[in-house]
Amino acid sequence: MTEAEDADVAANDERELERLLRFLTRPRLDFGLALALFVDPAVARDMRARATKLALEQGCNVATLDLARVGAEGDIIQHLRDQLEHADAVFVHALDRQLEDTLGHPLHSAALVNLNHRRDQLPELLSGRVVLWVSKRLYPRLAKIAWDLLEVSLTRVEFDRVAPTAIEPAPLEGAPAWFEFVGKAQLPKYGELARAWLNRANAATDPRAEAEAAAVAATLLVSTVDFDSAQAQLERATARFEQLGDLASAASQRARLADLLGYRGFHDRAEAQARAAVGLAHTAGNWATEAQCRQILADTLRRRSQWEESATTLSELAADSEARGDASNLAIALAKSGALFTAHDQFERAEATFQQASDLFAELGDDANWASARNSLADLRLAQGRLDEARRLYIEEVAPVVERLGDERQLAILRGRVARIHAKQGELDAALQILRDEELPVFERLNDKVSALGTKMIIADVLTQKGDLDAAATLFDDVANGARALSNPALELVATLHAAALHEQRARLKSALTRYEAANHLANHLGVPRDPELEQALTRLRPPPTPTDN
């Protein structure tokens, strides 16, 4: 496409955005349906964010409904009614996930069929405006399922632009699934949107409206890597929901707060929040929320090295899920248990558990979690030293699914796994090339700072194996400084200990002692168990006490 054609497409997208805004803010419209078609999911996300902001400036509150969370059997109309209780309009996205699975196979969505059958009742059932977002590629499939519904739409807009570097949001390894990190170019837009929702929360006179606005603001603030503000808004949302007696919503927000605290390395506080979330969800009688909270509790206990408690939590979750016929949560509990078994060298139990989880995910058609379980099996092979088998699983089984999902970040992680295999086989230059050129740039482009620091830790390990101790020590110091800037004391502690050991090895004893002292302070702050090796290093390097005169 020429520059002139690019400009024409961009200008057309702006005109389409104006049409969408007119639909959203049209006066005296009790109910209206619109269809938004797009080519690039990244452009669609940008247009939704801009439309939401512009509509809010005109007094129109736009909520979102993620159909990936509704499921193929869910009641879309009820979900729309719930959203429209507190909003003037709803953007319905992830519609593509109702039309085909992650491998591109067509799905028969009972939820969409039901919505199509009830199209004549929509003006009576819904008070507000609804916009269905679907890719142009899958529009013909949607039309086959729901042509009657599409016929009653009042407005149709089309966004044809393709972003130069379209990056799909992806779940982050080691980060909660609800985190969405965005590229640096999008940070100002997300920041504006976060401020708008913060202003709405501050101006709210209704506690529920305040809680819901604070919860949305927290999600947006995480995207801008403003974790302190995100944490404050999650605490605010939790408190308001508890005041309202809405225990299920309070549990969900407490669970998100536990997720965030655990991600930041505040494991004791995360555990307290996760346990409180489980209790609230159980009291509310909301099994879906309780299962999610118990998963988060197990993850938190694992991060605190409380392996037995984590395993017990997962075992109980698996038993309760099986008793309820909840195959999805059963499979998740099994997959997490397998990771625990791998960490404790219980390889046979881990393999059997991963296989059972893989089979369940396959039966459920959950390709993303199936790939995750197979990835965990590959990690097991890596831990066993069966490097060729691990490589085969990563490349032949996991990578094709990840590529089909368009998940650039997870693909970079897989390449990083292959780099670790190179390192274990002594192919250190090949490992460094992959880590520096194929994994790290993706994290930096996505502004995923924690994962970028994790990759730098691995690079420093490889440099240590190569004998380049000065470069490795410098990189560990950089990671410690970066972790400190992100208020992540757990990562800072690990990096500082590695740096201290290398400085001591290079006979830079004063520098080593400074870092061991810093690590000791961090360990005390985090409340981690006493480390004999750290105590020995401090005893070895601290100057002897000066005798005092009697």
Image (tube, helix red, strand yellow):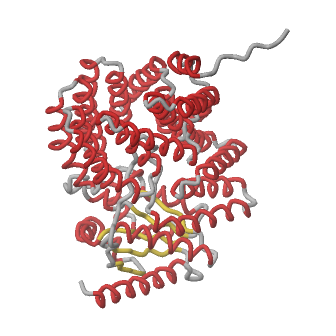
Q: Quadrant of residue 253?
A: top right
Q: Residue furthest top?
A: 550
The C terminus - image quarter = top right
Specify whether residue 268 is in view: no
Residue 98 against residue 515 in the figure, above or below? below
Q: Nearer the viewer, residue 231 or 21?
A: 231
Residue at screen point 73% across, 17% down: 546
Q: Position of residue 149 (x, y in %)?
A: 35, 71
Q: Position of residue 465 (x, y in %)?
A: 30, 33
Residue 129 against residue 330 in the figure, above or below? below
Q: Nearer the viewer, residue 296 or 81?
A: 296
Q: Nearer the viewer, residue 88 or 469?
A: 469
The N terminus - image quarter = bottom left
Residue 503 left/right relative to 543? left
Q: Position of residue 383 (x, y in %)?
A: 27, 26
Q: Quadrant of residue 242?
A: top right
Specify whether residue 120 is in view: yes
Q: Position of residue 143 (x, y in %)?
A: 26, 70
Residue 397 against residue 269 in the figure, above or below? below
Residue at screen point 55% across, 75% down: 30
Residue at screen point 28% across, 23% down: 350
Q: Quadrant of residue 151?
A: bottom left
